[in-house]
Amino acid sequence: MAKFVIKQAKDGEFRFNLKADNGQIILLSEKYISLSTCISGIISIQNNCADYGNYERKVTLNKKHFFVLKASNGKVIVKSELYDDETEMENGISSIKKNGTTKNVGEELFNYLI
């Protein structure tokens, strides 16, 4: 089952990964100043990832493909890794659409709540 994994950085800030069923990281968040804002980021992905209209596809100057996932208000939630071609990028979007609505948050979170 896909899951979100929250970790605390050495500087005290938080970030999360979205991992697919096979454990592969398919999304890495920005850093968040607090656990609550990190959780809000996860909720925003859960609420917005299913709509293809929330993905903006882009190409860098050196022809690498990437996308940004935006909330319904237009704010960027997350930026993808760089892909060599458009097909890889579309596969990345499909993976986030498939896995991003999971309500499963890995046990790592409980280390911060104890």
Image (tube, rainbow, N blue to C red):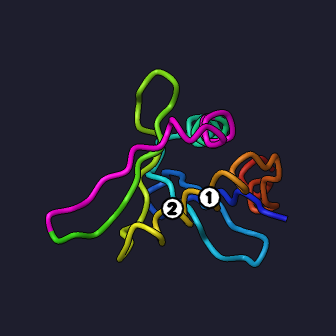
Whole-percent x, y for residue 85 in the image: 37, 73
Q: On the image, numbered disc 2 is attached to which residue?
A: 90
Q: Is residue 64 magenta?
A: no
| Distance between mark 2 and mark 1 Cα atoms | 6 Å
Q: Quadrant of residue 99?
A: bottom right
Q: Is residue 94 left or right of residue 33?
A: right
Left or right: 40 with respect to 68?
Answer: right
**Magenta highlight on residue 51:** yes
User: Please, what secondary structure does the residue beneath circle 1 have?
Assistant: helix
Which disc is residue 54 wearing? Answer: none
Secondary structure type for disc 2: helix
| Magenta stretch, residue numbers | 44-61
User: Which residue is under mark 1?
Assistant: 94
Vertical position of residue 59 compared to residue 101: above or below: below
Percent from the top left, x then y, of residue 51?
A: 61, 37
Q: Amino acid at mark 2?
A: Glu
Q: Nearer the viewer, residue 85 or 48?
A: 85
> Residue 32: image x %, image y %?
48, 44
Identified at 81% across, 46% down, the residue is 103
